[in-house]
Structures are given as structure tokens and as C-alpha cells.
Image (cartoon, rainbow, N blue to C red):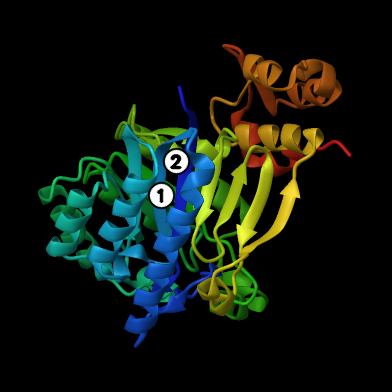
Amino acid sequence: MKKPLSLYIHIPYCVRKCAYCDFLSFSCGEREAEIAGYVGRLIREIAENACKYVDREVISIFIGGGTPSVIKADYIADILGCIKEKYRVSDEAEISMEANPGTLDREKLMIYRKAGVNRLSIGCQSVHDDELKCLGRIHSFEDFIRCYDMARECGFENINVDLMAGLPGSDEKKLEKSLRTVAEMGPEHISVYDLIIEEGTPFHARYGGKGAAQLPDEETDRKMYHMTASVLKEYGLERYEISNYAKPGYECRHNLVYWNREDYLGLGLNAASCVDNVRWKNTSDMSKYMKGGEIREEREELSINEQKFETMMLGLRLIRGVSIQEYRNRYGADLYEEYGEHIAKMKEYGLLTEGAGFLRLTEAGLDVADAVIEGFAVD
């Protein structure tokens, strides 16, 4: 049996950057020649790397960005065609693609389906047009409804919808409206991310200082978080990770690769990889990337302590928690022997619990997850 591998494909183009976004992406504008060149270079990178992974089976592919749906759909088909030709791709592989409602049409959706995309992740963010305008989104909620319905008509049976909480001027009532409106449409998966004000973004200039008063305070933010889980559960969407909710069997396989510390290969500009406990990322310099040659940077071989900490840090994001037996199998060490004092203290505070062989955060622990996880770091 071949060892599993997941692929992340980066498409660094958007119609325009949203006001909160700090990802590496560029406005596509009049860049068609550049985009065509980038896709060609990306396909060469995909093909050139294949010989290193002949002993692997690809179990998930995630095409992200940027906005992958902004480029020609035939480019997506060409990328997936190259992967299927050069790599062993499981018949059951999850093939996900991010899409913006302002860039989708029926023809594109049909090309994606034919190319093998079987999971669509649509960025809605809010059902309130005033919030979408504030975020700098290029679509309205009506655009989202149109694209969602088209995706269903084109045969997509696994759809994720992204929503955002903690928006300027928002409150529990507005967020609940977004949650219920989208959940009633019946997506298999909903991701609800808290707005994070990143340096260098228009939002940081707008809300990083005095403007922060327009953002929900910490108490309101926590109420929104707990309300989100409660509301989505009514629609059969169970929280399986801090920010992610799914119907049974529709948990995002690709993201589970990250949270379970499985191997993934990133392809494209600035794409990150971690294979056999070695981490690196591709250059973020487009001219260097396009020239080819050595594009990998920041290569780091993870120490055993770093591996163990990442297992705890990522695994505790999952509602099920960290498997005590899997930890022992992976590291030949007992979780309680290594972290017993910290675990006992966190249990005493009601922040950690154990059940069915898993160590996991309690509801109270989820509210202070970063602080609890920090205690698992070993120098």
C-alpha cells in the first residue's frame, strides 16, 4: 500500500484583494499573458516533482489562492490533468477548489466537474450586503445564491460555505441570520472564521487602533462562537474542529491532513509543504518562481520535540482531540509521562478532559485554546 500524500495548488490571482486579506495574491487586471505563463510554470513544477513521490498515493488535492475560479476553467482542467497523469491519485481522492461567487458561471462549473473537482468551497462570508461591502467582497448575497444553486444543478454534492464572524458593527443577531440562512440551503460543510486584523491590510489601517471599538469585544465574540455551534447543530452540522462544521462523513479530508500532521506537498508560488517531517515553502518572488531552478526556501527539519508539539497543537484543534494510542505509536512515548503535570493542571481547571482514548479540550478549554496548547511546548 502506497504512503498517502496530499497536494495543495496555489493560484495567486483575484479580481481584487479583499480589505482583510494578507495572503499572497495579485489583482488579475490585464494579466492574462502572465496568468497563462504562471499556469504553464506551475504545470512544469507539478510534473518535475512527480518522480520524487512515485511511492505515494494522492488522497486529496486542494486548489486555493487567491481565487482559483478567477482564471480560465481550462487552466484548472490542465492542472488536474497533469496531476492525474504524473501522480497516482486515489479513486476516492477529495479534490477541492475555492471559488468566489463573483467569478463563477455554469460553463466553468461544468468544466471543473469534468476535470474531477468533487468538492467546492464557496466564499460567502455574510448574507448581509453591507458587511460584504465592508469586507471589500466583489459579490452580493444574491450572487452567492445564484452560484450555489448553479453548483447544485451542475452536480456538486459536496459544498463548503465560508462565513466570517466578528465583523465590524456585527452582533449575535446578524451572525445568527447568516448562519441560519446559509444552513437552510443545505451545504455539507460550513467554515466560520473569526475576522483577524492583519498588519499591512486596509482593515489594519481602519481598525487596528481606535477603530477597534467598532469590532465586537471579547465577551461578545465568545457568545458568537458558542451560538455558532448551537445553531449549526440544529441543521445537522457538527463542529469537528474549532472553526469547522460538517454533516457526518463530509469533514474536509484535506484539512484533516494538516490537523493530523500527515504529509502534504505545496505547489505554486509561496506554497508550503511538510513531507517526512521536513518543512519548506516555495519562493514568494514571482520572477524567481517563473525562472525555475531552486525555488524552495526556509527548509527546516523538525526535531522530535517540534513534531510532538505540533501533534498537540494541531490535534487539539479537533473536537475529538489527540489519540493517546496514536501518539504512543508515532513517538514511542506516553502522553502522560511527557506532559502529565500540565495535563493534570488543565484538567483541574476544567480545560482538558479525556474520553474514548482521546485527550481533548473542554468547551471552556476551546475558549482559551492557545493558552492551553502553549503548555505542551518543550524547549
Residue at the location (62% across, 71% down)?
Answer: 212
Tell me if 4 is positioned left or right of 118 in this view. Answer: right
Residue at the location (29% across, 39% down)?
Answer: 188
Q: Based on the displayed image, in which of its 4 quarters is residue 233 positioned?
A: top left
Q: Amino acid at mark 1?
A: Phe
Tell me if 14 is positioned left or right of 258 in this view. Answer: left
**Which residue is under mark 1?**
62
In the rendered image, the vertical position of residue 150 relative to residue 275, given as above or below: below
Q: Are marks 1 and 2 in contact (CB under 8 Å)?
A: yes
State the mark number for residue 254: 2
Residue in the foreground of this view, choosing between 321 and 344: 321
Among numbered discs 1 and 2, the one appearing first in the sequence: 1
Disc 1 crowd rating (10 Å Cα; few below 14, some 14-19, many 20+) is: many
- Using the rendered image of the protein, determine whether residue 178 is visible from the camera's viewpoint: no
- Using the rendered image of the protein, determine whether residue 38 is visible from the camera's viewpoint: yes
Residue in the foreground of this view, choosing between 44 and 148: 44
Residue at the location (38% across, 66% down)?
Answer: 67
Q: Based on the displayed image, in which of its 4 quarters is residue 74 positioned?
A: bottom left
| Furthest residue toward top | 356
Q: Amino acid at mark 2?
A: His
Residue at the location (62% across, 58% down)?
Answer: 281
